[in-house]
Image (tube, rainbow, N blue to C red):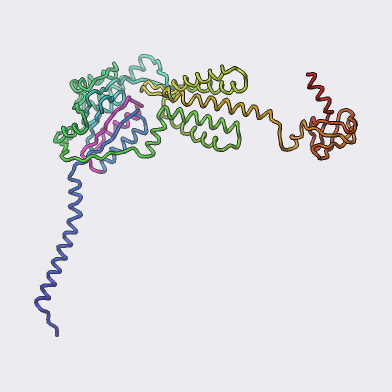
Amino acid sequence: MKFSSPTTHVTRAALIASATVLVLLLCLVPASVPQQVNSKPLVMDLSLDGEVEPVLATYIDEGLAEAAKKNAALVLITMDTPGGLSDSMKDIIQHILGSPVPVAVFVGPTGARGASAGFFVLLSADIAAMAPGTRTGAASPIIAIGGFTLGVDETLRKKITNDATAFLRSYSEKRGRNAALAETAVTDAKAFTEQESLNGRLIDYVATTPEELLNRLNGKTITRFDGSKTTLGLTGYQRAAFELSIRQKFLARIVEPDIFFLLLILGTLGIYAEFTHPGAVVPGVVGGICAVLALYAMHLLPVNLAGILLIVIAITLFVLEAKYTSHGILLLGGVVAMIFGAVFLIRSPLTSGGVSIGTALAVTVPFALLSVVLMRLVLRSRKWKQKTGPEAMLGEQGIAFAGLQQGVEGMIRVHGEMWQAVADRDIGAGSSVRVRKIDGLKLVVEPAAQQQTAKISS
């Protein structure tokens, strides 16, 4: 029978107590770490920079969803936009109004603007703010198809304007903003500085930097779109930037006017080179890809029909320059037409954007020279004598060593080879003959001296 000493019991008890404490600590540590991390309120930073278009709208929507997923305290959208497409604008506004996370829109930095569609977005936010030296407004709706501003009848114009002002009132009044003054930006195309916007109750704050705005918002109680009250706790906040994805950055670059024009010209040049030089492969592949990307951008951008027609005219003039001698007049006309086409290509009334003069010149001149050179090579190649196959025998000289009788097949020697031949007149033995036509494996010849005489007399 074995007995345990008191020391053994004490040791076991100590081990059990230590293990219990260790388990409790391990259970408590994971719970305490997130509390420490989440104790800092999160501010999600988004950037609305450039024209309001579908790619940018998707980015804002995804950023708001990410902020809700991370339980952010505030979404801060820094904006500098000349305006954009109404459908993309409405999509952004709908997501801002329905966001479970409060949204602040800040027009900045100094010199930025929130014009046209940006004005609608600014007034839809829970907090609207502007930096000194910025402006907003000028939100009159403009109807454009193919880049042309359409002259519509007064009834239709009133319908469009009234719809825009009703949409603006539908949320600006609930935000506690001056809807009557906001309507003048639509009906009269009025624009406002940051101080005019603040005095007119269009915005809530004027702040020099986003940091200043966040510090002023700390502890403020705001009314959400659904009428609920929310107090912004931004003490010791941490900021996280939500960036455009690689796909969105790529698509956003494609819809830039300069890039679109470059893709359009590269696509045209690549396909043109493949048709004029079949089998080159690389120009066709590159041109096809660029053409598809240009078609995608054309679907999103307000493309001017006049610009497209001028570019087509320019390409036609380049081809004619290669075929006819115009002493450079056709080439110069094509260059001028393409530059004007580039300038007119994207001149949206919604924005001040378009293809820059520098890009137009840098793309047009090389394209013109390459087009003329390629076409001249094609036209010149049609005059080249074929070097392989039976057709290579055309124009070659041989010897009728046994002579030829009119209409009777005989033998001649060409390049050391014996060929069956026939002539339309008698040819003496040892006379030189020239191949005039090929009939299967039989050559139709004529005296070489006769052809030489015909050339001299002509």
Q: Residue furthest top?
A: 154
Q: Residue furthest left?
A: 6
- Please name the residue shown 18% across and 35% down the image: 228
Quarter in which the C terminus is drawn: top right
- Please name the residue shown 17% across and 48% down the image: 36
Question: Which of the pair 259/116 is nearer the observer?
Answer: 259
Is 98 part of what is drawn in magenta? yes
Query: Can the viewer see residue 167 in this picture?
Result: no
Location of residue 369 by image quarter: top right
Q: Provide residue 299's location: percent of width, then percent of height.
A: 43, 29
Q: Provide residue 296's location: percent of width, then percent of height.
A: 45, 32
- Please name the residue shown 12% across and 72% down the image: 11
Location of residue 29 by image quarter: bottom left
Range covered by the magenta-colored residues: 70-99
Image mark count = 0
Query: Can the viewer see residue 137 in this picture?
Result: yes
Question: Which of the pair 181/262 is nearer the observer?
Answer: 262
Is 311 part of what is drawn in magenta? no
